[in-house]
Image: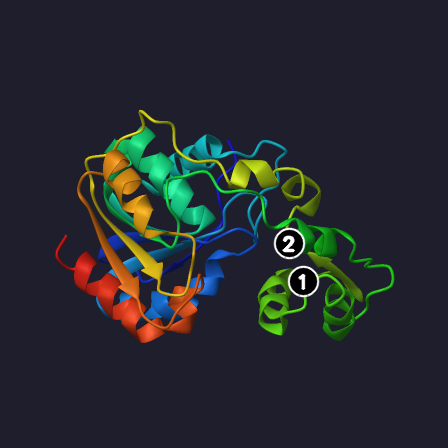
Amino acid sequence: MSILHSNIIGDKGKDLLILHGFLGMGNNWKTHAKQWVSLGYRVHLIDQRNHGRSFWSRDFNYLILAQDVVAYCKHQQLEKVLILGHSMGGKTVMHLACRFPEYVHAFVVADIAPKTYNPHHQQILNGLSHLDFNQIKTRSDADQALASYVEDAGTRMFLLKNLHWVSQGKLGLRLNIDVLKNTNDKIGEGLLPEDNSQHQCLFIKGEKSDYILENDTHLIKHHFPKAEQVTVPNAGHWLHAENPIFFFDTVTAWLQKR
């Protein structure tokens, strides 16, 4: 079985696994990871399948993504890990905790609920899939081409972190766009009604984000009776980047009690 790519920072301490969101990669979390390492954690920045430097596959749903983490833990000989997941990564963490509880000690979910979401990445996926790397020769060219689909410059900057040199003079994307653009419905899937975890967990949301709403609290408690919830002020869906100090301090204080 293929094993997920990771960047492991630190050589001792409690293992903390971090799962990025849709169209991201583990190294998006490098700044926070270095801080956690300084506090005695060993941090695994993991690329989920079809993302970053991990393998590509046509199979893509949350059960499979959770199984990938199990295979990674077995490969690294990890037991009872701490794990943090943002957005899509948070959904992977929820499935892992419910289906493979023996691998989890406690977990943090950043700005995603256990519910089903309507597909809403189609414009971005269309833009990425229309990038013609026979014509695009620089990062600036790619940004200009993507701007026709994605107006926000910050979002484009995030997406274009996936650019890399496939060969000399030839750019490409680390994302498996051909698969991801056809699995948009899978990304939005919620948990099954019977999915349940008794782990201690923290759901942390951005104040300006609409991914977790007040009326989602009941659903979170249904699946995760021991869940605690915190709101990050002055932050949207990218809460760890928009208010990094509050996010880091809050998650760290919670983790250190575990």
Q: Which residue is mark 1?
A: 164
Q: Is residue 78 in view from this perspective?
A: no
Residue 163 sits in quarter = bottom right
Q: Is residue 245 left or right of residue 48?
A: left
Badge 2 marks a residue whose secondary structure is loop
Q: Is 178 located above or below residue 214 in the figure?
A: above
Q: Is residue 22 left or right of residue 101?
A: right
Q: Is 213 located above or below residue 10 in the figure?
A: above
Taking the spot 62% from the left edge, 60% from the top edge, the residue there is 162
Residue 72 sits in quarter = top left
Taking the spot 60% from the left edge, 65% from the top edge, the residue there is 161
The percent position of residue 114, horizontal first and vertical second, equals 37, 40
Taking the spot 19% from the left edge, 35% from the top edge, the residue there is 198
Q: Is 107 located above or below residue 116 in the figure?
A: below
The percent position of residue 130, horizontal first and vertical second, equals 79, 54
Residue type at the position of mark 1: His
The percent position of residue 245, horizontal first and vertical second, equals 31, 75
Q: Which residue is mark 2?
A: 174
The CA span between labels 2 and 1 is: 7 Å
**Which one is in front, 10 or 33?**
33
Badge 1 marks a residue whose secondary structure is strand
Q: Is residue 18 left or right of residue 175?
A: left
The crowding category of the residue bearing disc 1, from other C-alpha atoms within 10 Å (few below 14, some 14 to 19, many at least 20), is few
- Circles 2 and 1: CB distance less than 8 Å? yes
Q: Is residue 127 in view from this perspective?
A: yes
Taking the spot 22% from the left edge, 68% from the top edge, the residue there is 39
